[in-house]
Image (spheres, grey):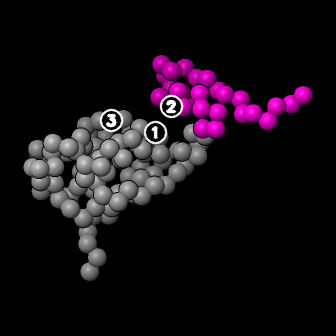
């Protein structure tokens, strides 16, 4: 008898950052790696969404935000630091790929931070 269930592939959790996702029978990391996601807003909620999508291994993230960082954003936005005041939120969030966290190596970010005219 042949089963239609997907085989769960268990990899080394010490070396494979996505290993635990393999415990989910329907998970397909290749689809995640090839996914393209747009996040509208890089403020407090957008910060968390961007961070978690990148940690999951989403391959391409398009960030749309026209706002700039101000001091009031710093208490609730993990990706922004005091030195970022006055800079575009989308550009700063995308720059964290390599600057501070170095966690998002497989993720490619694109930014749209200018208003329509």
Which numbered disc flags the more N-terminal residue, 1 or 2? 2
Q: Residues within 10 Å of mark 3 (few under 14, many from 20)?
A: few
Label 3 and label 2: CA atoms lie apart by 16 Å
Query: Residue 102 got which mark?
Result: 3
Which numbered disc flags the more N-terminal residue, 3 or 2? 2
Residue 112 position, x and y percent, is 32, 64
Is 3 drawn above or below residue 80 in the view shown? above
Residue 14 position, x and y percent, is 48, 19
Q: Nearer the viewer, residue 11 or 43?
A: 43
Is 96 drawn above or below residue 39 in the view shown? above
The answer to whether marks 1 and 2 mark residues whose Cβ atoms lie closer than 8 Å is yes
Q: Residues within 10 Å of mark 2 (few under 14, many from 20)?
A: some
Which residues fall within the magenta stretch? Answer: 1-27
Residue under label 1: 56
Residue under label 2: 18
Residue 77, image quadrant: top left
- Magenta stretch prevailing secondary structure: loop
The N terminus lies in which quarter of the figure? top right
Point out the frontmost of discs 3 and 2.
Answer: 2
Q: Is residue 45 magenta?
A: no
The C terminus lies in which quarter of the figure? bottom left
* Residue at 79% in and 36% down: 4
Q: Is residue 4 magenta?
A: yes
Q: Residues within 10 Å of mark 1 (few under 14, many from 20)?
A: some
The answer to whether marks 3 and 2 mark residues whose Cβ atoms lie closer than 8 Å is no
Which element type, helix, strand or loop, lies under badge 3?
loop
Which element type, helix, strand or loop, lies under badge 2?
loop
Label 1 and label 3: CA atoms lie apart by 14 Å
Which element type, helix, strand or loop, lies under badge 1?
helix
* Residue at 60% in and 38% down: 27
Label 1 and label 2: CA atoms lie apart by 7 Å
């Amino acid at each position: 008898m042949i089963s239609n269930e997907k085989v769960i592939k268990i990899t080394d959790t010490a070396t494979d950052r996505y290993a635990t996702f393999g415990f989910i029978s329907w998970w397909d990391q290749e689809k995640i790696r090839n996914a393209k996601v747009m996040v509208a807003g890089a403020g407090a909620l957008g910060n968390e969404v961007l961070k978690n999508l990148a940690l999951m291994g989403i391959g391409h993230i398009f960030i749309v935000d026209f706002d700039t960082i101000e001091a009031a954003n710093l208490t609730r936005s993990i990706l922004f630091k005091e030195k970022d005041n006055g800079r575009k939120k989308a550009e700063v969030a995308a720059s964290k790929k390599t600057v501070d966290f170095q966690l998002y190596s497989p993720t490619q970010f694109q930014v749209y931070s200018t208003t329509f005219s």
